[in-house]
Image (cartoon, rainbow, N blue to C red):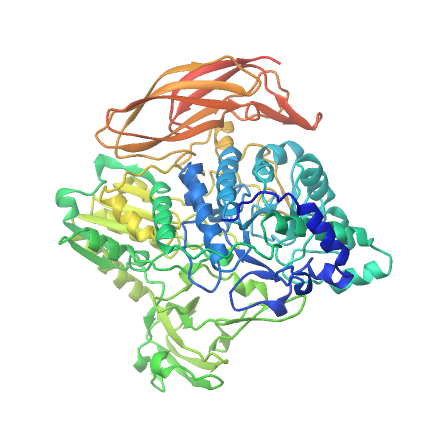
Amino acid sequence: MTQANPLPDAPVTVARLLAQLTLDEKISLLHGNWSVLEKLGEAGVIPGVPRLGIPPLRLSDGPSGVRVTARATALPAPVALASTFDPALAHAYGTVIGREGRALQQNVQLAPMVNLVRTPYGGRNFETFGEDPLLISDIAVAQIQGIQEQGMIATVKHLAANSQEHDRQTVDAIVDEQTLREMELPAFEAAVRAGVGSVMAAYNSVNGAFACESPELLDELLRQDWGFDGWVMTDWWAAHSTQASLTAGLDMEMPTGKYFGRALKEAVEAGEISETLVDRAVDRILTVMDRFGLLEASADAAPPRDPAFGAEIARQVAVAGAVLLRNEHATLPLTGAAARSIAVIGMTGSVPFVSGGGSSHVVPDHADSPLQALRARAGGAEVAFAAGVDWCGKDIPAEDLSPAVLLDVTGTQAIPPGRSWSYDGTLCADEDDEWTFVLHWSHHEEWTQEDDAVPIYNRPAIVFDGEELFPVQPGWEELFTGGLVGTSADGLALRSATRNVTKGTHTLSIRADADADGMSFRLRRETPATRAADLAEAVSAARSAETTVVFAWQDATEGKDLETLALPAAQDELISAVAAVTPRTVVVLNTATSVTMPWLPDTAAVLQMWYSGQQGAQAAAELLFGDENPSGRLPVSCPADEESHPMAGDPARYPGTDGRVTYSEGIHVGYRWYDAYDVEPLFPFGHGLSYTEFTYADLRTEAATETGVEVSFTLRNTGTRSGAEVVQIYLGPSPDLGLPQAVRKLAAYRRLTLAPGEEQRVRLMIGRRQLSSWSPSEHDWVLGTGERAIAVGASSRDLRLHGVIRLHA
């Protein structure tokens, strides 16, 4: 196993290579190259210099596993990992990624993502670790160590203030110095201190300068303040210049070389850029490669994959990251009569919902549906199923079309490579109605080979009453038009389009041109009548069961933010209708972030399982039946409604105005905002229930030292089951600092497992950094002295013990 430690002769090795490299070879190491991509599915490749023994550098997407074309362990989304509040489990999560990355011939993992969850609408909130900088830092560091101990290079991303997908490539984030230092940057700093090999700079600007060409971020912060000795790469196509970027401290352009290829060579040859800047960037890249043994002729062989180990860690994270939000009258775990007759409702009950969309999606080794897992666990109990809401649509009856045809060109009817299929006719509507057309097709993606490479798509052209229903969006827009609920049960991609139709006939034309891989497609539709029938079927199934378990979903993806916090596709109505006939209604949420829950008072239990990875169905069954005890805690606050969260009512704050998004909430992000403005969340940060009970007692504090203040108390499991509790210490403001401070902030935490009746004396250290605030006038951390409140409890609002600490300068 290759350890991520510097080799004694690294400087000599790199210096020797630098002296032998030609200018062309140096420049080839500073940008990706499409022409050397193999069919491994990596995100990008640096080609290397074979004559000097410099191997290619292969970069794979993350952060939920190794994203290549081959199968890999599909781990739960990072938000689920954060919900464990368990750095040890984060280390194991990283170990799986690092080992599999090397086994799948990858060298660099583009993870972890540590941007703060600032807006609940963020399309990539599921890819990061929540709203608290201490928790994000701890989980990120442990994951990085796990990845890099296996000999794979981790990449912390996206520096900085990349907290929304809306206008992400152009928006300018206006953030004050204290907010940056206290909220957004701590995890990046912690990653650097932990020895992360590379940093990815964000698309967006920060305070007027693109992140990829900001001297303040890439030189003053990373290099000078934190001592970062790795390399900085762009996000994909995030570069905007040659000289300004290289001078600022950018080292690598991905995935091609529009600015760091021919343009860089011409600038060096013209004397506009010193070759020493090129050498500096190459040195940084080669030094990290040498540190990980990649320049050694005798480098360790890649380890074999261990799918069983990966699956077990995926299961553990899915279990430990599941958050029991509500459990009235001990509805869960399911036992006795309640477990003998179960209705599973919801499409994601029958289809594995493994991960979100975008670059984080991993092809899993295997994934059961919750329905399969529940039936296996329930033994001989009756487990019925009804979709309730069907995102795949229903076949359009052939008799509604003239000429009559079943629009299902799949299987033996699929279009052969290079051939075409067409249809011209009419579609009859019996009455004025609303139709949602759903296209299923075999999605193939190709890329241009230019510096400004964009994806090229091919799908059937469906023209209804003269309007194309599913036009291909330009370039990157198409790549991010849907998340994972954009896939049918047989693996075809989905798009939907809703239109109001009038009674009578409507023209329908279809043309499908198969590429070299052939093409399969079908056209379906949903109508108010089919939706009503689906709902009636679900209500009937629920009425006949002792317990109803509704699996609800939210489809999030990189590239676009959510438009609402409500569950999509009439799922709120579905849950309300089911709960009206079954008091014992349990809702399992597969969502990217917090959602509004208008049906909450009518339900018996709610289990938040996020995007739970390839073992999510098994984990759900174990939790519902009580084989495992829920112990996850919310890493984000859940707003009560669309108007009661930090981004509500201020477009300058989100989504931004005139190309700028202003972080006017300052340090009051997430739960700090709810506390500062006395707003009641639906569920607070840190919340999570258990099948057992815990009591807290005897709070004590030790005198402050240079390293911080020790806090101790006694935790006891007073219930009848073994379980894990996440104890949390919150710190109040200093009266001596003339700076914005939180009403209370998470200052320390620990996950502890206790047997029934077991008691443990817990000792936690509130570190000096947590006791300090960033002073813009001092440009440094300043200790917050005086008498400061502390509280110990099970969430940011469930505080069981209270005390004070006294700090002196």
Residue at image point 22% right, 44% down: 625
Instruction: Tell me, yes or no, if residue 266 can be seen here.
Output: yes
Specify the quadrant that holds the C terminus.
Answer: top right
Name of the residue lying farthest toward the front: 298
Q: Would residue 74 be found to the left or right of residue 215 on screen?
A: left
Tally of marks: 0
Closer to us: 66 or 619: 66
Closer to us: 56 or 758: 56
Above-or-below relation of 662 to 676: below
Q: Residue 3 at what x, y percent from top left?
A: 53, 45
Residue at image point 33% right, 80% down: 400
Q: Residue 109 at what x, y percent from top left?
A: 54, 52
Instruction: Tell me, yes or no, if residue 250 can be seen here.
Output: no
Residue at image point 44% right, 78% down: 519
Q: Quadrant of residue 44?
A: bottom right
Q: Would residue 421 be found to the left or right of residue 286 on screen?
A: left
Closer to us: 457 or 37: 37
Above-or-below relation of 271 to 323: below
Above-or-below relation of 671 to 447: above
Q: Residue 367 at what x, y percent from top left?
A: 33, 58
Q: Residue 781 at what x, y percent from top left?
A: 64, 26
